[in-house]
Image: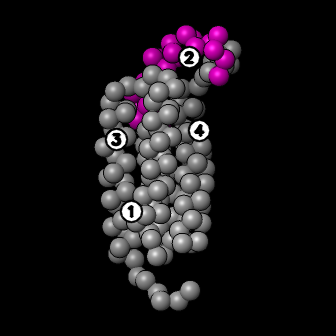
Amino acid sequence: MVRTIIGVVVGAVCLGGIVALLQQVPSAMHPLPPELNPLDPADAAGFAEYLAGMPAGVWLVAMLSEVLGAAIGALMAGVIARDAPRGASGGVVALAVLASAANWTAFAHPVWYIAGQIFLYPVALTGVWALLAARPRSGTG
């Protein structure tokens, strides 16, 4: 049980770190204008305009960074949580889905972006479960 909790925590930290790192790519591809503060409600209209002008390729890279972060975090959680690898990895992907849903409601996303994540998160989790099932298991500590 302790290893499962540790696995989920480590997986969640990996998820956040990987997404934060990989999100630098779409940020570099379509930089935010320096005068625009997305956290300032007074800039909401400008931020919406910025997002509306974001190329599809930038959205795609952002979407894939989140799914990849979830997959790697889930794999880490599953490896650490030897007795409950599916539950730990599923917990990390569930956290990623919750974070993505919060993001979808915070500002406008293309419909295909949301649909893509809804499709890809279970695909990524299934792949992680397959990797975890295929790995050699040792009986030691």
Label 4 sits on residue: 24
Q: Report how far apart the C-alphas of labels 4 and 1 lie in the structure.
A: 25 Å
- Residue 40 in the image, given as x and y percentages of width and height: 66, 17
Q: Compare residues 106 and 35 and report the one nearer the observer.
A: 106
In reply to whether residue 41 is colored magenta, the answer given is yes
Label 4 or label 1, whichever lies nearer to me, is 1
Range of magenta residues: 39-62
Crowding at dot 4, Cα within 10 Å, few <14 / some 14-19 / many 20+, comes out as some
- Could you tell which of marks 4 and 3 lies nearer the N-terminus? 4
Q: Residue at x 51, y 40 (%)?
A: 99
Residue indicated by mark 2? 47
Residue 69 appears in view: yes
Q: Which amino acid, by three-letter code, is at mark 1?
A: Val
**Foreground mark, 2 or 3?**
3
Residue 141 on image: x %, y %: 56, 86
Q: Which label's residue is closer to the chain start, 1 or 2?
A: 2
Name the residue that disc number 3 marks. Answer: 118
Verify CB contact (< 8 Å) between mark 2 and mark 3: no
Q: Which residue is mark 1?
A: 128
Q: Is residue 6 above or below residue 22?
A: below
Asked if one can make out residue 54 in the rendered structure from this viewpoint, the answer is no
The quarter of the image holding the N terminus is bottom right
The color scheme shown is one colour
Q: Are marks 2 and 4 in contact (CB under 8 Å)?
A: no
Q: Separation of disc 2 and disc 3 at Cα?
A: 24 Å
